[in-house]
Image (tube, rainbow, N blue to C red):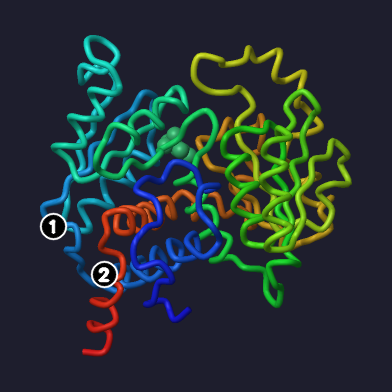
Amino acid sequence: MDGYTLTHKTPTRKDFIDTADFDQSEILDIITLSRTVRDFIKSGGYLNSLFHKNLAMLFEQKSTRTRVSFEVAMEQLGGHALNLAPGAIQLGAHETIEDTAQVLGRMCDMVMARVDRHESIEALAKYSKTPVLNGMSEKVHPTQGIGDMITIFDHWPEGKQAKDIKVVFVGDATQVCNTLCDMTTKMGMNFVHFGPTNHKITDEWLEIGRKNVEKYGGSCEWSDNPDAVEGADFIYTDVWYGLYDKETPKEVYMADFYPKYQVNIDLMASTGNPNCKFMHCLPANRNEEVTDDVLDGANSIAFDEAENRLTAQRGLVLYFGGVAQATLDYIKDQRKA
Ligand code: CP
C-alpha cells in the first residue's frame, strides 16, 4: 500500500464497536490513513475534511486520553466535538439510551461513547442513524487498539516480519488485553497473555485470536509461567484494580498479582531481548503493575502510545465520517504541488 490508496473506500460497517468486527485489510486501511494524516499534519499540512461536522462525545466514565484526543482530532480536521460528561445531559436520569441515541444521531454527524456496559454501545449504534465509535466498554477498547498497533508499527523491530514478533500482555485480562489479542493476531503476530488463572483472558477471546491465527499466521496463548515473556518484542500491561463499579480492593488485587506480574527491570530482563519495548494504555498505577524505572525507562514507548491515541482518532473520524479516500487524495495532491 502506498499510503494514499485504501482497499475499502468506505467502511464495511456504520459503527466501530469492536476491532473483531473488521478484517485485517480494513484495520490496515485505518492504520495507514491515520499515519499518513499524522505525517501530513506534523509536516505543517492543514486539513478541513470534517468542516461543519460534529462529534458527540458521551462519557459514562472519566477519561483523559480518549476525551482530549477525539476533541483535538475533530478540531484539527475542521470539525467540532461536544463533551457530554456524566450529569450534563438527561441520559441516566430522565432519558433512555435509545432515545438519547436517536436525538444525537439526528443532530450530530458521529457519536463516540465510553460506556459502563457494552450493551449500551450496541444500543447507541442501533438507534443512532450516524456512526457510533466505542470509546471503551468493559469488554473492549477498540480506539486504544488502533493507537496501539500504530505504535507497534512505529517501533517495528528491525528486520522482523509480523510472524516473528511477540507481544506479551502481563497481568489482568482487561478490555485492553482483549482488543490487543485481536489486533496482534489479526496482524499475524504472536500474542501471549501472561496472567494468573483467576484473571485469565477468556476462552472466547483466545478463540477469536486463534481464528485470526488460522487466517493470518502467528500464535495465541495464555500462560501463568514466567517463561512466557521470553523473546518478547513488546511487553504490555494495564492496571490491576479493575474499572467501573467493580473496582477491586487493593489487598485483593495485590495478593493476585504482586510480585509475579509486576513489570519491573527483572521482568524486562527476563525477556532476554534488550530491545524489548514497554507499553501501557495509561493511566498507570505507578509501582504497582509497572515500576517507575520501566515506565520512565529508555525502552518505554507508553507516551508515544498515548500520543498515538490522537493519531488513531483522526483516522477513525475520517474513516467513519466517510471522507478517508478524499482526504488521502487531497494529501497526495498537496505533496505533488
Ligand atoms: N487509555 C485510556 O483510555 O485513557 P483514558 O481513560 O484517559 O481515556
Graded by Cα atoms within 10 Å as few (under 14), some (14 to 19) or many (20 or more), the crowding at tag 2 reads many
Give the residue at the far left of this rendering.
52
Q: Which residue is mark 2?
A: 327
Q: Given the image, on which type of amino acid does mark 2 rest?
A: Thr
In the rendered structure, which amino acid carries the disc numbered 1? Phe
Q: Give me the residue at 79% from left, 29% from top.
A: 196
Q: Which comes sooner in the sequence, label 1 or label 2?
A: 1
**Please, is residue 197 above or below residue 265 in the view?**
above
Position of 174 with respect to 200 (left or right) is left
Q: Quadrant of residue 288?
A: top right
Q: Residue at x 76, y 21 (%)?
A: 256
Image coords of residue 248 (percent x, y): 62, 15
Residue that appears at 30% across and 22% down: 97
Crowding near the residue tagged with mark 1, few <14, some 14–19, many ≥20 C-alpha atoms within 10 Å: some
* 290 is higher (above) or lower (below) than 303: above
Image quarter for ligand 1 equals top left
The C terminus lies in which quarter of the figure? Answer: bottom left
Question: Horizontally, is 21 left or right of 203 in the view?
Answer: left
- Expressed as whole percent of the image width and height from the top left, the position of residue 214 reads 73, 58
Q: How many marks?
A: 2
Q: Which mark is residue 51?
A: 1
Q: Residue at x 68, y 67 (%)?
A: 162
SS class, disc 1: loop
Tell me: 182 left or right of 191.
Answer: left
Measured from the top left, where is residue 270 in percent x and y? 84, 50
Task: Judge whether 27 appears above or below 178 on screen.
Answer: below
